[in-house]
Amino acid sequence: MNIDDDDFTLFGLPERFALDSAQLDQRWRELQTEVHPDRFAAQGAASQRIAMQWSMRVNQAYQRLKDPLKRAAYLCERRGAPIDAERNTAMPREFLMQQMAWRETLDEAVDGAAVQALADQVEQHEQALRGRLQELLDERNDAAAAAAQVRALMFVARFRQDIDLRLETLEQ
Amino acid sequence: MALLQISEPGQAPDPHQRRIAVGIDLGTTHSLVAAVRHGVAECLPDAQGRVLLPSVVRYLDGQRRQVGFDARAHQAEDAVHTIASAKRFMGRRLADLKVAAQLPYEFVDQPGMVAVRTRQGLKTAVEVSAEILATLRQRAEDSFDDELFGAVITVPAYFDDAQRQATKDAAQLAGLEVLRLINEPTAAAVAYGLDHGIEGLYAVYDLGGGTFDVSLLRLSKGVFEVVATGGDAALGGDDFDHLLASWALEQAGRSAVSSQDRGALQMAARRTRESLTDHVVATLHCPLDDGDLRLDVTREQLETLTRPLLERTLAALRKVLRDARVQRGDVLGVVMVGGATRMPAVRRAVGEFFGAEGHVRVLTDVNPDEVVALGAAIQANALAGNAKGGQLLLLDVIPLSLGIETMGGLVERIVERNTTIPVAKAQEFTTYQDGQTAMAIHVVQGERELVADCRSLARFELRGIPPMAAGVARIRVSFQVDADGLLSVSALETGSGVQASVVVKPSYGLGDDQVAQMLRDSFAHAQDDMRLRALREARVDADRLLLATQSALDADGELLTEDDRRAIGALMARLRNLAASEDHDAINAAAEALAKGTEEFAAARMNRGIRVALAGRNIEDV
């Protein structure tokens, strides 16, 4: 066990997209119980510094593994297909049409119920995309296609943030 | 002490030596100090048996001041020089204070943090809070007849970096060693969780005098994980009182113009509100300059009047649930914290929010005024290494996103809110002009898109970037948030290795030097005592360090080269010789040299210790 190990090794999990999130959470708590600076509070500055480095490393890995998008991006990168979202902005025409239609629906939604309906629809779509992503990563081992899928999901995730923001405004 | 001791994590190196550690709830309206005694957390009373200390400081002529009940007794007559609820001004500018106009103080805006003009000059919230903390420290030292090892101080979960830093500075000014700043809702959860054996997802609803916090925690076998936190830094019981006071004036067709009147009316309103918890009608009575104000108020009137404030707390609750992506039904119970949660309307509204009665446990059985201090005491005891078993671990989050300013006054977020701390994150940026050799880095905190809408935390410059075409330089900006929730930022041009960094300290006119000067001033009258105390402390520390170093060498000496070992041996001999002298500065310097000289050794031991633990305590794997 080393601080420079990859996230999966650090957490003792198989290197794949499918993940038991309860197991991940539990492993995170176990790791923090060993490395958190508070566990070494009475033991001086050097121990504090080392514990903080470990604790940060464990949190970093946890954040990356917990979020399906970040986890997928991490796997793609490790398999030689970095996401590089800033340079790869080309998306299939069909996907862009769908995005525009959603945006219009959001702009025209008048009440919370309409926005919620759209949120549910987007959520469903996201789940389907994630299922496909899992297939590409865990079964076909096609990192390049998976990376394209991650980029599409990033668009959807950003759109869902806009929906959340709108729901928040409607509630106030 | 730099060396890792041979002991289980979470336990004091020397089991015979119990360290006195306290929890302090530095509240808006009142403050408390608590400690674990005989295995039980309890609030420490003053000589009159009172545990609450009103967070009020009155500045009198000369250097005299009154703190707590004495100060509050004169609040109405000497409102201008009697500072209450200073917590609301912590790390704030005048423009941030929405209630400034309603308060009796003469505010003076200063860069970084507002001050109040008193008989003893300008006083910031840091100085006022330091008076309160020093009073509590004295109370604790009297209770134990011993010096304190350290304190855990609570802050609202919603406090930003400036407010947290200000709290830490106040503690330093009061001569307190801060073991950790922890969030108030988290502390409350600790007090409940450990006493009640709670497991699962719980909400903490904390309506204090001046702040409202809500946190969602997952409790599992002594690990307290904050899932999401939110709230309103400018909403509390005081606002209920303001509303009631203004309404009463209006009803009576009166006005309160003098600051004395406003102060008196605010206090009368609080008494009335508190009385309406147990009674359905109460009389608001307040002497004003132009005659007494007397008005009957019903509980129903109070509830109708303050319903909008209650709605604001429920909106914050909804937002936290959404942030955490959990449903109301997932929440098993709600811990109620803060004196204002005694209001029947608050308990009712929170119960109804979570659905049918009985579905969610609304936990009110620990005194809501004391629960935060009790939780802090439990954590302090654990951090001091006194707790047996060492089961307790708090995993808290940052309440507000952190980022930097980019082109066009936009915020690029680097650490998202509700990220577990400690956390380190880095992002790359580039130059936008050909030949650009410097880059200004502006660190901000908040959720809004525009820099102007966020809180500015710090500015610094990365200079000496070699001239390159626009967009070629790679500037890596790293954010590091420690376990207290405090931020430091560094920037590095990765091609040339040019580096700049800053520990984010809000510039509220209280630099480290100034804090040190204030400390010296406050001790000046007791020079001789101080010198003896310093010598005694220096010798104790030296002994401890020598002992620890020796046992570390015995246990893990093989990690060192022969040269390293000789160097450490020389440092130890020097410290041992000096410890017999009368010069505490020389003893401390030698101890510091030994600590520094063994830092790498300590780091190596620590790293190995953690690797062993993570590998399932299997030494073969290391």
Image (tube, coloured by chain):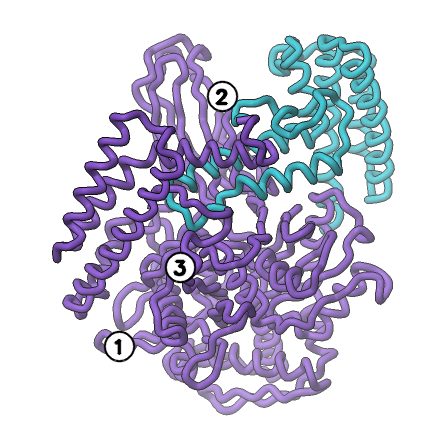
Q: Amino acid at mark 3?
A: Gly
Residue at x 61%, y 59% (from the top left corner): B190
Marks 1 & 3, CB-CB < 8 Å contact: no
Q: Position of residue B371 (x, y in %)?
A: 59, 68
* Helix, strand or loop under label 2: strand
Mark number displayed over residue B150: 3
User: Considering only vertical position in the picture, is B376 above or below B225?
Assistant: below
Q: Choose mark 2 or mark 3, whichever is in front.
A: 3
Chain colored cyan: A
Q: Position of residue A148 (x, y in %)?
A: 73, 12
Q: Position of residue B73 (x, y in %)?
A: 42, 84
Q: Nearer the viewer, residue B272 or B614?
A: B614
Q: Is residue B524 left or right of residue B18?
A: left
Q: Which residue is mark 1?
A: B64
Chain colored purple: B
Q: Nearer the viewer, residue A34 or B30?
A: A34
Marks 2 & 3, CB-CB < 8 Å contact: no
Q: CA distance from mark 1 to mark 3?
A: 27 Å
